[in-house]
């Protein structure tokens, strides 16, 4: 979002005018050793020289600011090296084209060719101004990032307040629910499958309550909760639902937001066909300091109605808590989500 945000055109124009005015007047006066308020100051050649350089410095400043604050961010780039390469080439071309055009057009505006000494001095000034403009452009981008971060934080705070209010409105007395589950367990004690189902459900609810006050839980705790959740899913779908978990033990102490894995498995169940001919298999595995949850895509013919906010909420929670981003890879064959597990600083 921050990368696509554009710097205001009016702000860029004001800065470009300021740079052109500040650079051109001292440059013109120093080059021709002009004294204020003499007839020589207002001679045609000197006036045309001043106007030409003022115009070129303005156009150069405006174009360079636009390139480094707006245009470069519209180009999709796959890596930082490509980004740096495009920035370097673009800025170099701007500098070379501007100084070359000034040298070529100078005789048409001023009745003499620009001297080598003067051309070298002007080119040096352009180079110095170019460096300053690049720093100014970076400051403008950082201001945008800061403003967007403030707005996003305010939005998330508002969302948290709304979620807390909703939770308070929908709060259920835990003791009542657990007592009800215990009573149900007593009534169905002769049915082992139903008894196990209730126990798993009771464990899930207890875990949800306990994790509500924690931002992060150990991966091994989340996997234990996921085992209970998948037991309930398998009770419904039997052999039509499969889950394969292959996680290196060294990651079991790492921490992730609670219910992250459950949400991803639930998302797969909700959006994919589950049948005898096309059973759903969810694979969870670790690789290169990350956890992957993936499944083959077989879109349901009749999709369950949903809000579409599950993955978005997980993305925001992961970023807010771990300061890392999950990666969602979606194509016609596979749906894969990458959860970073590297240790937080």
Image: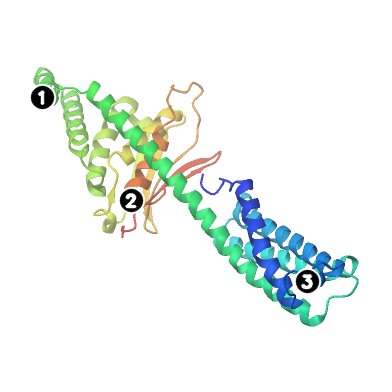
The quadrant of the rendering that contains the C terminus is bottom left
To which residue does mark 3 refer? Answer: 38
Name the mark nearer the viewer: 3 or 2.
3
Q: Residue at x 15, y 25 (%)?
A: 195
Residue appearing at x 60%, y 54% in the figure? 69
State the residue position of label 2.
322
89 left or right of 39? left
Q: Earlier in the sequence, mark 3 or mark 2?
A: 3
Q: Is residue 300 left or right of residue 74?
A: left
Where does residue 264 sit, x and y in percent of width and height? 38, 38
Left or right, residue 47 beside residue 274: right
Residue 166 placement (x, y as % from top left) = 28, 25
Q: Which residue is mark 1?
A: 175
Within-10-Å neighbours for mark 3: few <14, some 14–19, many 20+: few
Q: Secondary structure at mark 3?
A: loop
Image spot of residue 231 (x, y percent):
26, 33
């Amino acid at each position: 979002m921050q990368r696509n945000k554009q710097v205001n055109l009016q702000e860029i124009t004001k800065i470009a005018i300021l740079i052109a005015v500040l650079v051109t007047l001292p440059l013109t006066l120093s080059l021709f050793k002009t004294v204020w308020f003499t007839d020589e100051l207002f001679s045609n050649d000197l006036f045309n020289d001043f106007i030409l350089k003022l115009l070129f410095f303005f156009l150069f400043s405006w174009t360079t600011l636009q390139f480094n604050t707006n245009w470069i961010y519209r180009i999709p780039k796959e890596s930082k090296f490509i980004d740096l390469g495009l920035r370097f080439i673009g800025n170099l071309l701007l500098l070379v084209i501007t100084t070359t055009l000034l040298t070529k057009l100078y005789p048409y505006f001023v009745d003499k060719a620009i001297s080598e000494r003067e051309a070298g001095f002007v080119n040096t000034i352009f180079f110095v101004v170019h460096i300053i403009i690049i720093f100014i452009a970076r400051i403008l981008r950082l201001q945008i990032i800061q403003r967007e971060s403030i707005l996003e934080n305010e939005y998330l705070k508002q969302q948290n307040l709304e979620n807390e209010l909703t939770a308070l409105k929908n709060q259920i007395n835990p003791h009542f629910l657990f007592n009800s589950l215990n009573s149900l367990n007593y009534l169905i004690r002769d049915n082992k499958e139903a008894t196990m189902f209730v126990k798993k459900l009771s464990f899930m609810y207890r875990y949800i309550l306990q994790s509500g006050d924690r931002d992060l839980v150990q991966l091994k705790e989340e996997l234990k909760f996921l085992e209970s959740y998948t037991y309930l899913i398998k009770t419904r779908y039997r052999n039509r639902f499969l889950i394969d978990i292959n996680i290196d033990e060294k990651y079991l102490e790492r921490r992730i937001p609670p219910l992250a894995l459950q949400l991803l498995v639930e998302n797969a169940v909700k959006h994919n066909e589950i049948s005898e001919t096309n059973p759903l298999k969810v694979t969870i595995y670790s690789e290169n300091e990350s956890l992957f949850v993936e499944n083959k895509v077989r879109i349901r013919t009749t999709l369950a109605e949903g809000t579409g906010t599950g993955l978005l909420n997980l993305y925001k929670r992961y970023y807010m808590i771990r300061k890392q981003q999950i990666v969602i890879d979606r194509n016609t064959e596979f749906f894969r989500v990458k959860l970073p597990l590297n240790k937080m600083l």
